[in-house]
Image (cartoon, helix red, strand yellow):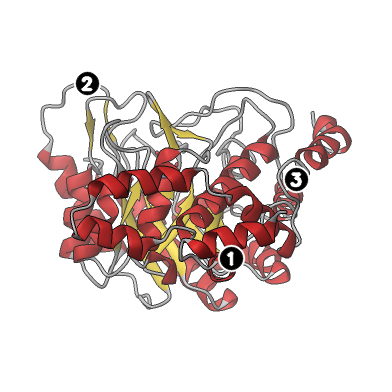
């Protein structure tokens, strides 16, 4: 076969496989730099634990420790994933040359010049994130701290990050999504839930008072339900993040991370609700497993359903800003990275290969019997053949062909790291 037969089968269902592949290769997906080094960054002691309610578990050898190691790993990933990649950086990945250290409140665009060069050489856009965790100035609160000095430090960090995001957008001629997430919260029942939220709101107002062009820089506010060590109360809850972005239209947009909700709450069901009210939204695609919100993304039901919603809501034209967010230190990190990126590409291709008009009219005419049967049949349509064709056309390895390359890289490069 196989592609031509698959093409014909899909065509009989009213689906144009050529069109699907054409759309897919232009959907930007942000590749998070932090899978390569267990979210350590370059600006703090790598032996200090990750804070902010997030954790990497596992000690698989080969973690990247420098800009050179991390970019070498990213290049390996780029060779193995089809699609339109954007890079996603955290402020903690600033590069300090020859003693030019600056704390997070003093970061400047020059600390990201090497990253800009890296992106330019590869034709990548770049997204950005202030880093409100794993730092001695987390007390442990940041933007919601009652300590005015602490809060000011983190506000200044946020403002510096807005300037850096503008720099990235201008240099790379590509919209920069700047995501604000803090792990602020409490392990146990607080006495004052309102105070931290009011302070967080004021801090965000101050950060967003920095000048930026909203058509180029899109600040986002990411919510969370709980984190490890902050189980009882999260300042930036779902209602907080949504409320803030609704009240500040034209200045920021909401970001949903699908690992940040109660297990039976699904982000696939939330996308259309948000798009009813917000012209643009952002997503962190991840996989929640029990207490962990950051397992490697797989080609599973919810990833497919999120992708179907993105496609059906017209999100592929830029309305939905898509980023990946997971970190696993228990398996080969490059393989984790590639598995997640390819899984999301697969999910989007699967979504683009649905006869959405037919399915919609079955719903609208109340024919739920046919709707169920057809949706089930579509699961075993010859999707794999179209996926393989897409990989080949993108000059990227098909399934089964890329892991040996990573094993080779592990043997020649990763295993040599101390
Ligand atoms: C944490 C949030 C946040 C981080 C990254 C590193 O729960 O999802 O987005 O994972 O900023
Ligand atoms: Zn996230």
Q: Position of residue 105 (x, y in %)?
A: 44, 55
Q: Is mark 2 on a helix, strand or loop?
A: loop
Asked if disc 3 is less than 8 Å from ligand 1, the answer is no
- How far is mark 1 from mark 3, CA to CA? 33 Å
In the image shown, does 206 or 409 lie closer to the viewer?
409
Q: Count all numbered tags in the image, as a single digit.
A: 3
Give the residue number, with chain letter if any, for mark 1: 21
Q: In which quarter of the image is residue 51?
A: top left
Residue 400, horizontal then vertical, whole percent: 75, 40
Write the residue at 35% across / 75% down.
Answer: 214
Instruction: Name the residue beneath numbered marker 3.
Output: 69
- Dot 2 beta carbon under 8 Å from ligand 1: no
The residue mark sitting in front, 2 or 1, is 1
> Sequence order check: which comes first, mark 1 or mark 3?
1
In the displayed structure, does residue 347 sit left or right of residue 192?
right
Q: Judge by depth and name the residue closer to the eye, 397 or 148.
A: 397
User: Measured from the top left, where is residue 29 in percent x and y?
Assistant: 53, 59
Question: Few, some or many C-alpha atoms within 10 Å of disc 1 (few <14, some 14-19, many ≥20)?
Answer: many
Q: Image point 29% across, 65% down: which residue? A: 252
Q: Residue at x 61, y 33 (%)?
A: 46
Residue 337 visible in the displayed image: yes
Residue pointed to by mark 2: 188
Q: Distance between the residues labelled 2 and 1?
A: 49 Å
- Is 111 or 389 nearer to us in this picture? 389
Q: In which quarter of the image is the C terminus?
A: top right
Looking at the image, in which quadrant does ligand 1 appear?
Answer: top left
Q: In this view, does 407 lie to the left or right of 55?
A: right
């Amino acid at each position: 076969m196989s592609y031509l037969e698959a093409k014909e089968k899909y065509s009989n269902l009213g689906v144009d496989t050529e069109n699907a592949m054409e759309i897919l290769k232009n959907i930007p997906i942000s590749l998070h730099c932090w899978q390569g080094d267990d979210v350590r960054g370059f600006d703090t002691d790598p032996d200090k634990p990750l804070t902010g309610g997030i954790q990497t578990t596992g000690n698989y050898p080969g973690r990247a420790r420098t800009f050179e190691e991390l970019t070498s790993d990213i290049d390996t990933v780029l060779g193995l994933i089809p699609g339109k990649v954007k890079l996603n950086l955290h402020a903690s990945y600033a590069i300090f040359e020859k003693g030019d250290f600056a704390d997070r409140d003093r970061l400047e665009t020059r600390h990201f010049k090497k990253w800009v060069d890296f992106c330019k050489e590869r034709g990548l856009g770049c997204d950005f994130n202030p880093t409100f965790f794993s730092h001695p100035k987390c007390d442990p609160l940041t933007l919601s701290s009652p300590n005015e000095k602490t809060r000011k430090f983190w506000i200044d960090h946020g403002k510096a990050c807005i300037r850096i995001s503008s720099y990235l957008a201008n240099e790379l001629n590509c919209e920069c999504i700047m995501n604000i997430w803090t792990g602020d919260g409490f392990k146990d029942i607080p006495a004052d839930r309102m105070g931290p939220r009011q302070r967080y709101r004021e801090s965000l107002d101050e950060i967003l008072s920095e000048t930026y062009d909203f058509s180029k820089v899109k600040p986002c506010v990411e919510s969370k339900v709980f984190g490890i060590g902050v189980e009882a109360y999260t300042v930036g809850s779902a209602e907080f993040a949504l409320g803030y972005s609704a009240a500040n239209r034209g200045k920021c947009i909401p970001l949903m991370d699908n690992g940040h909700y109660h297990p039976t709450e699904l982000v696939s069901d939330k996308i259309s609700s948000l798009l009813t009210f917000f012209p643009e939204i952002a997503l962190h695609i991840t996989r929640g497993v029990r207490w962990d919100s950051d397992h490697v993304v797989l080609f599973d039901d919810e990833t497919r359903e999120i992708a179907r919603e993105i496609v059906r809501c017209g999100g592929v034209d830029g309305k939905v800003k898509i980023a990946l967010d997971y970190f696993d230190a228990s398996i080969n990190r490059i393989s984790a990275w590639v598995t997640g990126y390819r899984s999301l590409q697969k999910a989007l291709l699967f979504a683009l290969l649905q006869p959405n008009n037919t399915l919609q009219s079955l719903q609208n005419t109340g024919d739920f019997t046919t709707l169920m049967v057809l949706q089930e049949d579509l699961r075993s349509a010859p999707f794999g053949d179209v996926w393989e064709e897409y990989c080949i056309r993108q000059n990227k390895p098909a399934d089964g062909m890329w892991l040996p390359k990573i094993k080779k890289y592990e043997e020649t490069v990763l295993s040599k790291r101390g």
